[in-house]
Amino acid sequence: MKKVKIWTGTLFGAGLLPAAPGTWGSFFTLPLIYLASWLHPGIGLIVFLILTILLSLWSAPENVKQFGEDPSQFVMDESAGQTVVFLTAGFHYTITEDLILLLGGFLLFRIFDVLKPLGIKTLEKLSGKYGILADDLLAGLYALISLELLLLFI
């Protein structure tokens, strides 16, 4: 079970890639987000978000044991945060528009996740698996708001 939790927490090895594991984790989550939305436009992303949150909380302790406190290799929390960004996105299922939307949401999430403004850094300091996850969920929420504002003005 230990290896399953490590494999899950690293998003099937994405977090083990060299340089910027959080970015890789977020990037490899994008097709899963799109697939969830396409399979069930009504609740697909909500179900996927709940799944990533549960998998994050389930696998985080084992990843902390393996890699240390709030390990960069653990990217399931990035998957959850990246999913939040697209909860209200409304994909059109046309490749050009949706790729632009996915790229925009990805970049906004990475900016908030890396810079950690507006209380994100504070949440990161919470102890244990909830602190590991909470900052990414808030970064996702800020990225969602920013994406919606951009879409409103474009």
Image (tube, grey):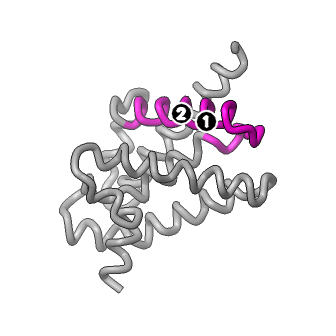
Identity of the residue drawn at 47% across and 31% down: 107
As drawn, the residue found furthest toward the bottom would be 1
Is there any visible trace of residue 48 in the rendered image? yes
> How far across and how far down the image is residue 99, in percent?
61, 36
- Residue 91 numbered tag: none
The residue singled out by tag 1 in the image is 99
Q: Main secondary structure of the magenta part?
A: helix
Provide the residue span drawn in magenta: 86-113
As drawn, the residue found furthest toward the front would be 95
Total numbered labels placed on residues in the image: 2
Badge 1: residue crowd in 10 Å (few <14, some 14–19, many ≥20): some
Per the model, the C-alpha gap separating discs 2 and 1 is: 6 Å
Specify whether residue 71 is painted magenta. Answer: no
The residue singled out by tag 2 in the image is 103
Residue 5: image quadrant is: bottom left
Question: Would residue 119 be found to the left or right of residue 3 on screen?
Answer: right
The answer to whether 100 is drawn above or below residue 1 in the figure is above
